[in-house]
Amino acid sequence: MDHALLISLMVFAVTLFFMLWAYSLMGSRQRVRAWGERIRGKSPTVEVTQTEKGIAYLNTVFLKILERLGQATKPKDQTETSRLRRALITAGYRGAQAPIIFLGTKLFLALCMVGLFFVFGAEYLRTLPANWIPLTGLACALAGFYAPQFWLSWAITHRKEKLIKGFPDALDLMVVCVEAGLGLDQAIARVGEEIKLGHPELAEEFQLVSLELRAGFTREQALRNLGERTELEDIRSLIALLIQTDRFGTSIAQALRVHSDSMRLNRRLKAEELAAKLPVKLMFPLILFIFPSLLIVIMGPGIIKLMRDIFPMFSQ
């Protein structure tokens, strides 16, 4: 194949991949407009342009390619597949084909990294010994193959931080709803609706609990599923409290109020702990960077004047 044609194909494939990825993150303007109309209390109008249809078609084709690649690398052990599915659910990806697409993305990026290196690093490869070329290609393939795994770990951590950030507000709102006379199921559904704009990730989790309750799940099972999806100790402690309250018939409002006060105290203690660690963390930057600069600025002119007085040759 011609060298220029190969470069063009590789650039096109990588550009298409990042365009589809950016489109999936940003969403279309139509969806943003629909959200604005929902906020204003209007029924959203659905208008699909030809450009959006074309992008949706390309996205569908690309996902099918990733599914084919994922089937080739799908582990035979169902335990590995279940572990990957749980990790993707924790990161917020609940599609039935999410594990297959993730595995296909790993293989696709590995092939792209190898192809890009051998295309754009051809001049560099000529300077390498012959036995280094396979090792270099293997290193590029491993980098592309494991990059999605690092991204998945980052996505899980980032989503957990968002859930933790919105959980205190959701808990306080749940206390208000229960004390106002709503049942626990109705309070969960109402909280999911109210925090949708401020904390969409946590609202999605509460809405899933509400949907599971409507689908016939027991309250205990729906709450335990919430704990398994989020993998957060604060949420699991609330779930254990709600299950015990429901089992023994105690007051839910009082239990939520006590738990909310306890969590507020724990957050204050964590903030005080972080503040106490701050001087220790600042010590090394102060010693290595700030103090030497201050010494140079403060003592530098005096040292120069002293050296000029002691050694007249410096004054010439």
Image: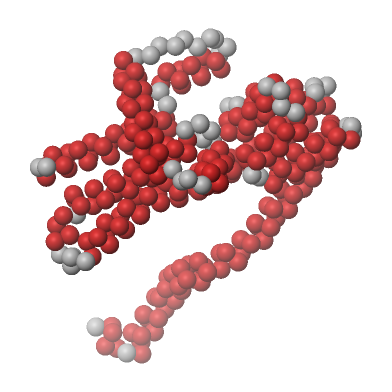
| Viewer-nearest residue: 3 or 202 | 3
In the displayed orientation, state which residue is furthest to the front. 76
Quadrant containing the N terminus is top left
In the image, is 15 to the left or to the right of 292?
left
What residue is at 28 percent from the left and 39 percent from the top?
A: 14
Residue 129: x and y in percent read: 18, 67
| Viewer-nearest residue: 162 or 243 | 243
In the image, is 114 to the left or to the right of 206?
left
Q: Quadrant of residue 194?
A: top right
What residue is at 37 percent from the left and 50 percent from the top?
A: 145
What residue is at 47 percent from the left and 39 percent from the top?
A: 99
Where 299 sits versus 244, above or below? below
Residue 283: x and y in percent read: 56, 68
In the image, is 90 to the left or to the right of 235?
left
Model colouring: secondary structure
* Residue 9 visible within the image: yes
* Residue 21 visible within the image: no
In the displayed orientation, state which residue is furthest to the left. 2
Tally of numbered tags:
0
Where 45 sits versus 28, above or below? above
| Viewer-nearest residue: 256 or 247 | 247
In the image, is 272 to the left or to the right of 182?
left
| Viewer-nearest residue: 286 or 54 | 54
Residue 244: x and y in percent read: 83, 38
What residue is at 27 percent from the left and 62 percent from the top?
A: 135
Quadrant containing the C terminus is bottom left
Residue 148: x and y in percent read: 42, 46
